[in-house]
Amino acid sequence: MHIQIVLFDGFDLLDAIAPYEVFTAAAMYLNEEVTVKLVSAEGKRLVTSGVNHLQVQASDKLDLNRKGIILIPGASGFIHDNGPDSVPVKLQQATETELSHLLKEAIMKPDILLTTVCGGSCILAMGGLLEGRHAVTHHMGMELLSATGAIPVNARVVDDGNLITGGGVTSGIDVALYLVERELGPQIAHAVEQLFEHERRGTIWKAEGNVPKESKHENPVEATIQPCTIQSNEIWGFLGKWDTTISTPIGKLSVLIDLSTNDGQIVGTAKQGEEIVPLDNPSLEGKQLKWSMKVTKPMRLTLKFSVSIDGNQMVGEAKAGMLPSSKLIGHRIT
């Protein structure tokens, strides 16, 4: 069995090193060859971890011609911050490297088992690779999974066939032990558990068997929003066409927003280039108009907008889970 643990600038040490220890320990109990490598998308280099900036040697380039397991850790950094040392920014930066292209190819290969720990699944999600797939990540990133079209599952480890994801930083041990059991057998996994004096937490979630009666498949982090009806003069100020600019961390987007009414309800569309998408569930809350909207550029996301107006000027923000907010400014053109 061949395991490649992928390092990228800002990676979380425990997400990567804990699985490395588990896989290396499993190799001690086997006669067959088990290789474990720390790799990067760029090749052999020193890779700097997040927060403490410890440099770890990647011994080789990620090799998609080697069948086996590829494990993607999350990032470490500041949580409540949109600066360069924040976790969302580091995850997004990882998607802008060669790693993103390699992962798109890897997930299509039948002899590769793609695995993530903690925020690693957010890297896949932000690359558009988890649409319709069951997955888990750190609890603060679950809303981002939903925004990218994934199906978030509140579990320690989620098995979705050729995709295994773990939630939370310490889940790297549980993910690796489950992979040892799945690929090498429960006796080997049990031996490693005894060696580490660690017992896995929680049941491995799979889309198999009976579904509990109380289970609901809608995203638990999404609230149902009722359509906005024309009830006050506040809403009339929003109607019309707005030429807006959304400033994202990776560039500016020009979007034409068209707000009107239909049967006493406010409706709208957004045009970016030649693409026109509807505004989902416009809702007036106080003096702010809120809606959600699916976009494909710069990545596939469901963005949540919150805007206010001052005469013919519009200001607000767009948000997708834990990603940094994107500022919106615009003016009315009709």
Image: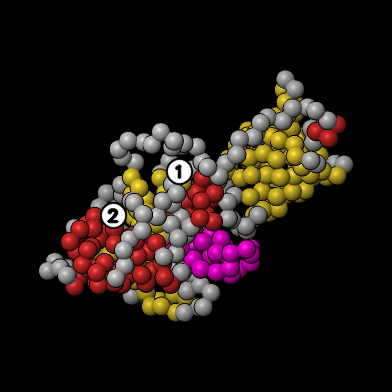
> Which residue shows up at 79% across the image and 36% down it?
238
Quick one: label 2 or label 1, which is nearer the N terminus?
Answer: 2
Residue 186: x and y, percent? 20, 58
In the picture shown, does residue 331 fall above or below 112? above
Does residue 287 show up magenta in the picture? no
Q: Which quarter shows the N terminus?
A: bottom left
> Which residue shows up at 64% across the image and 44% down it?
304
Graded by Cα atoms within 10 Å as few (under 14), some (14 to 19) or many (20 or more), the crowding at tag 2 reads many
Residue range corresponding to the magenta coloring: 68-94
Position of residue 95 in the picture relative to residue 187 (left or right): right
In the picture shown, does residue 83 fall above or below 95? below
Q: Is residue 200 visible?
A: yes
Amino acid found under the numbered disc labelled 2: Ile
Classify mark 1: helix, strand or loop: strand
Q: Is residue 107 visible?
A: no
Residue 113: x and y, percent? 30, 54
Residue nearer the viewer, 295 or 30: 30
Position of residue 79 in the picture relative to residue 5 (left or right): right
Residue nearer the viewer, 133 or 4: 133
Query: Disc 2 versus disc 1: distance between alpha carbons?
Result: 21 Å
Residue 106: x and y, percent? 34, 54
Q: Which quarter shows the C terminus?
A: top right
Which residue position is annotated with label 1? 151
Does residue 86 show up magenta in the picture? yes
